[in-house]
Amino acid sequence: MAKYLSLKDYRWIYFLLIIVVSWPLLSPLGLPVPVGKSTKMAFDTIEKLPPGSLVAVSSVLSGGNWPDLGPPQTALAQHLFKKKMKIVFIGAVDEAPTILETTLLPRINKYGAEYGVDYVNLGFIAGAPDVAEAAFATSLRKVLTVDFTGKPLDQLPIMKGVNTLADFKLVIHIGMAEDPVRQYYTPFKIPLIVGVYGMMGPHYIPYLEAGQLAGMIVGLRGAAEYEYLVGFVGEGLQGSDALSMTHLLVAVFVILGNASYLYSTRTRTKKEG
Amino acid sequence: MNMLDLTIVTTVFLTLCVYTFVYKESAFWRFAEQTFIGLALGYTFVLAIQQILTVAWIPISTGKNYLFIGALILGFLLYARFSKKHAWISRWPTAVLIGIGTGVAMRTVVEGQIVTQITATFLPLVTTDPLKTFNNIAIVVMVLSTLFFFTFTGGKGKAAGNVRTLGRYTLMLTFGAAFGGTVLTRMTLFVGRFTYLWAPAQRYYLLAIGAGMLIILASYEKISQILTKK
């Protein structure tokens, strides 16, 4: 029995994974996407803001984490543009501004927003995330003199009168949640929404329950929920079926693995006893 | 006839190169690995130079801020680590970096991650919503039992042992959720990549390049087997 339950060659798992992922991509299953509390909170927070509110979006987006963090940031940016907010994008890692320009912004409808007036890409601030975020929040004019295109901040209408995070109505951070709670929420008490890695979701629920987060989008799954609320079909909804199927496959392997372990332990105990 | 889209060819080829590692380490995998490292280093180097110019050099050269001279000197001193004789000098900028990093991170830790979190644990144990009541009781009991698990002095006997066991189970539940979440996030990365590869614009490139790479890998393996036998 244990022989059948334990896979001798791990490559079978990868093979099954490819089958499970390709199936819903070839023929969508239309599995339901129930919206979670944290996603709804994020959506409601943006909905309640008046059009034209200044929103900061900082992120640690890179090519490697795009599948998990790209869809949440895309869905949030789409919502912000749809609601006619003034958006200031800033990168806490070097790849973030480039990914924003080449991959994220071309995918969304900007509803006629004008660069420099309605949104701006400020590039990135060097240093560890905590230091970069603190510098952006407390003295952005000292660490940033030009935007990502090299244009001086003084020449950008959107940056007029913007000196610290206190000038923003909302801050969104894509990455982890500890550092923005420390550098954005705690000193300024500005509503903070985070888009986090799928694996970090359970860790950050205490911040949500304590009222330090105004909403949280957890990985690709959270992005699917948010896209559903915004009415935008992006990578979240496209990959939702495949993701559900992989979760199901993992659950089956966990059950089989435990069954195999328990069976082999019992057999060994019987033999020894 | 459409021209070959070199961007798609490159992304599909490099993605498949990385995925060949799932089967076994190959020349394709090593090529993708080294290409990635080279590109990442080049990109970071250019951005770092750009950052030094815009943030430090321009304010210094235009006389707007001379304080950045100190930062540039400290940055330059980091290179002393390449000389065995002068490596100790690089400890100074390292100490400044660690000091600033720790100081900035710690200044709001007490309020943001200790006081607020403790306050949030003071929950009503009876509410009108049965689910909320259950959740609140579970949170309070699990927090207290986990804290008790790490109390090594006093609290002996069967009852204390049971509380510690509950604390241990709480920790195991947390670690299990963290591990499960990590596995599922890796799946997300794969789903994201596969969704891109399987999209109509990329699908035929995937099949053609994938078939080509498979033939090369199989032929290489066969030839290696024949040569080894000889």
Image (spheres, coloured by chain):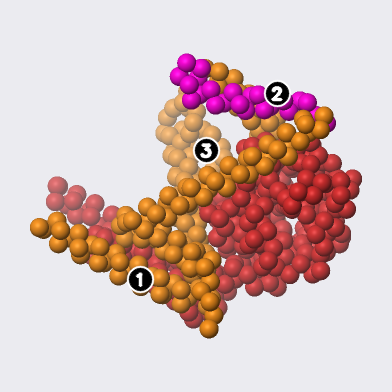
Chain colours: A red, B orange
User: Could you tell me which secondary element the residue under label 2 belongs to?
Assistant: helix
Within 10 angstroms of label 1, few (less than 14), some, or many (20 or more) residues? few
The Cα–Cα distance between marks 3 and 1, rounded to whole angstroms, is 58 Å
Query: Which marked residue is nearer to the observer: mark 3 or mark 1?
Result: 1
The stretch drawn in magenta includes residue A184:
no
Disc ID at residue B145: 3
Within 10 angstroms of label 3, few (less than 14), some, or many (20 or more) residues? many
- Residue beneath disc 1: B212
The stretch drawn in magenta includes residue B86:
yes
On the rendered structure, is B202 left or right of A74? left
Q: Residue at x 49, y 54 (%)?
A: B181
The Cα–Cα distance between marks 1 and 2, rounded to whole angstroms, is 55 Å
- Marked residue chain, label 2: B
- Residue beneath disc 2: B70
Q: Sequence-wise, which precedes: disc 3 or disc 2?
A: 2
- Marked residue chain, label 1: B
Q: Is residue A36 above or below residue B39?
A: below
On the rendered structure, is B130 left or right of B191? right
Name which residue type carries label 2. Gly
Q: Position of residue A107 (x, y in %)?
A: 66, 68
Quarter-of-image position of residue A235: bottom right
Q: Position of residue A89 (x, y in %)?
A: 73, 52
Q: Is residue B171 above or below residue B147?
A: below
User: In this picture, which residue range is highlighted in magenta?
Assistant: B64-87
